[in-house]
Amino acid sequence: MTQQKLELTWIGKDQRPRLEPRILLEDPARSYHARQRVTDKDLFDNRLIKGDNLLALKALEAEFAGRVKCVFIDPPYNTGSAFTHYDDGLEHSIWLGLMRDRLEIIRRLLSDDGSLWITIDDNEAHYLKVLCDEVFGRRNYLTSVVWEKDKGRRSDTTFSASHDYVLIYARNPDLFGKTRNLLERTEDQESRYRNPDNDPRGPWLQGDNGTAKSSSEGSRFPVVLPSGRSVVPPPSRGWSFSRETLETARAEGRVYFGAKGDGMPIIKRYLSAVQAGVVPRTWWPADEAGHNQEAKRDHLNKLLRDVEPFPTPKPERLLHRIFSIATNPGDLVLDSFAGSGTTGAVAHKMGRRWIMVELGEHCHTHIVPRLQKVIDGQDPGGVTQATGWQGGGGFRYYELAPTLLATDRWGNLVINPEYDAAMLSAAMCKLEGFSYAPSEVLWWQHGRSSERDFIYVTTQTLSAEQLDALSSEVGTERSLLVCCAAYRGVSAAQAAERWPQLTIKKIPKMVKDRCEWGHDDYSLNVANLPMAQKKAAAPTQDDLFGAAAGDSA
């Protein structure tokens, strides 16, 4: 019997934005670096991007596809409070459509052993799970962690919500399972290992010991204790270990019979012999992974006293646990809903490279000053002590470039006058799949796709004589994509025959139908959507994209 594939459907699912792959422009005045190196492992090339996160993800795709080890996102939870005036079915459709568009790019950004971690509440968790199954494949779902976000109890509601979910997906579950890290034992877990008999091999825990239900005669053999007393299990029970296991352990001095040698046998399991850490569980209590009040009270309020803290920030201990499991020092971490910057702060302290994206003004009011304090070693809260953080490193601040093509007064698409020659070359390289790499020697080499394939970008109209000279310089062993305003003196067919190593295209004609030009906001905060008119036709996805992003990390 053929199994039918199950898919989540929603209004507008078949509508997908045609994203413009923007270039990123660094603002050196907002980039920040430590005045001196603290260690040889200081990381300086982290990225903070201000702008729409869907456009930012698209901007990162060409350079970082397959390179991100861990993506953590804390998207707006779509709680319903923002949808008082909207149709219930439509609100979920908007949210699911916008999440799907982001998840598809995130999947392409993940490395083969990479993983995605999403915090979400009950309102959309189950819809999001099915959506992620569709984008990543159901076999790539690892688990859902239940995180105790609030240790308190509210009395003004039917049920007092105390947890969020963390959905976890892997690009390749088998590979992730081989590379994921164990968690360090807590003091409580280590305290269970004791050494009452001063065993030189160190603390131990009870392994096989005592009796269990058994109908096998072979499990009811007598054991002679060091005191001389012989014991056997009671009727209908047997030893929980075999005769051979006990004899081997006894010969190796790994059996404990109590302080007087007259107790039931206990086979020791030494702390030094067990694996270096513990397997993560799916229940993360606040005492282990932190909670919202901790982040708000003990960290953000102390670190950023002059700004309004987020209502439900994520604690640094939560991110520390995630990165401890999913990454190693030097790995790249991405958060496209940066919020107050917890991801970058924790990744920085743990020696992970990071990229964060944030559209809201709190990119300047919260994230930048917070990271500056981390870099300057002036952040005493969060996981600073646990990581031994003393400062160092830095980040580069970027904004998305404006749209490449703008509309002139006659309604025609033209190259945006805000673009200079370097910006135009970089943008065309990204659109055409080239790496932007202008040569200091070859004036016509603005980018490359291989050792023999290059791109040249100009707003000039090229003559046949100019193309002859360009063809001669390129030679017969290389190929060149020429992006120009126009060329004259030959037809397209004649150009292809006369200059076979050149591919000549006209801008902006060559790209004008490729993207949604001039679309700057695909944000997920739907609170500011225009009021739907009664009996109006359902809006398209293009109508619905707009508003300032809202996030809570």
Image (cartoon, helix red, strand yellow):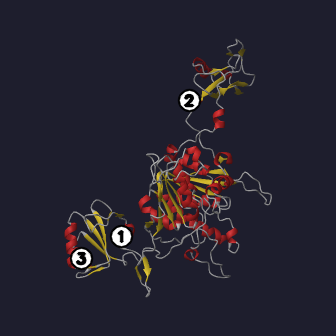
Q: Could you tell me if residue 5 is visible in this image?
A: no
Q: Which badge, 2 or 1, comes first in the chain's sequence?
A: 2
**Label 1 vs label 3: CA separation?**
27 Å
In percent of width and height, residue 472 lies at 19, 69
Residue 270 seen in the figure: yes
- Residue type, numbered disc 1: Ala
Determine whether the residue tagged by mark 1 lies in a helix, strand or loop.
helix
Quadrant for residue 423, please give it: bottom left
Q: CA distance from mark 2 to mark 1?
A: 60 Å
Where residue 299 is drawn, which disc sits there? none
402 or 36, which is in the foreground? 36
Disc 3 on helix, strand or loop?
Answer: helix
Estimate the spatial distance between the alpha carbons at disc 2 and disc 3, rounded to whole Å.
74 Å
Where residue 93 appears, x then y in whole percent? 61, 69
Label 1: how many Cα within 10 Å (few below 14, some 14–19, many 20+): few
Query: Marks 1 and 2: in contact by CB < 8 Å?
Result: no
Dots 2 and 3: beta carbons under 8 Å? no
Lateral position of residue 216 relative to residue 338, left or right: right
Q: Amino acid at mark 3?
A: Ala
Q: Quadrant of the N terminus?
A: bottom right
Q: Which residue is mark 2?
A: 273
User: Is the residue marked by circle 3 packed among few (<14), some (14-19), or many (20+) residues within 10 Å?
Assistant: some
Q: Name the residue type under label 2.
A: Ala
Q: Are marks 1 and 3 in contact (CB under 8 Å)?
A: no
* Residue under numbered circle 3: 495
Q: Which residue is mark 1?
A: 422
Between marks 1 and 3 in the image, the one whose residue lies nearer the viewer: 1
Q: Position of residue 46 (x, y in %)?
A: 47, 56
